[in-house]
Amino acid sequence: LDLLLTQIEKTMGFEVGRIGIEAQIENAQGLNNVNEIAQASPRVETIIFGPADFMASINMKSLVVGEQPPGYPADAYHYILMKIL
């Protein structure tokens, strides 16, 4: 992706590195690889958490995206967000 963006920048006459990357964590595998994703390119500017896809990937039961699971007293996303941080 970095190489492709560099080619686009050169073709368009932009400064190389001008286009950034926003990576989104959408499943458990992405969360496990978050450090590698963050370091994959100097263009990575931010990492976003996609709660709906993540919830589906781990079979988390909820009727509303981002809602706490019924009967779970703590913050269901605390670990995920701290790992991304």
Image (cartoon, rainbow, N blue to C red):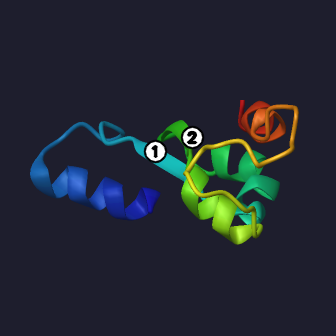
Residue at horizontal 76%, vertical 62%? 28
Q: Secondary structure at mark 1?
A: strand
- Three-letter amino acid code of the residue under disc 1: Glu
Which image quarter holds the C terminus?
A: top right
Residue 20: % across, % down: 38, 41
Q: Quadrant for residue 73, please give it.
A: top right
3 or 48: nearer the viewer: 48
Task: Report crowding for label 2: few under 14, some 14 to 19, many 20 or more residues within 10 A (C-alpha).
Answer: some
Residue at horizontal 44%, vertical 63%? 1
Which residue is identified by label 2? 47
Residue at horizontal 84%, vertical 37%? 79
- Three-letter amino acid code of the residue under disc 2: Ile
Q: In terms of sequence position, does the residue under pointer 2 or pointer 1 come before the other?
A: 1
Instruction: Tell whether label 1 touches label 2 (CB within 8 Å).
Output: yes
Residue 38: % across, % down: 65, 43
What number of labels is visible?
2
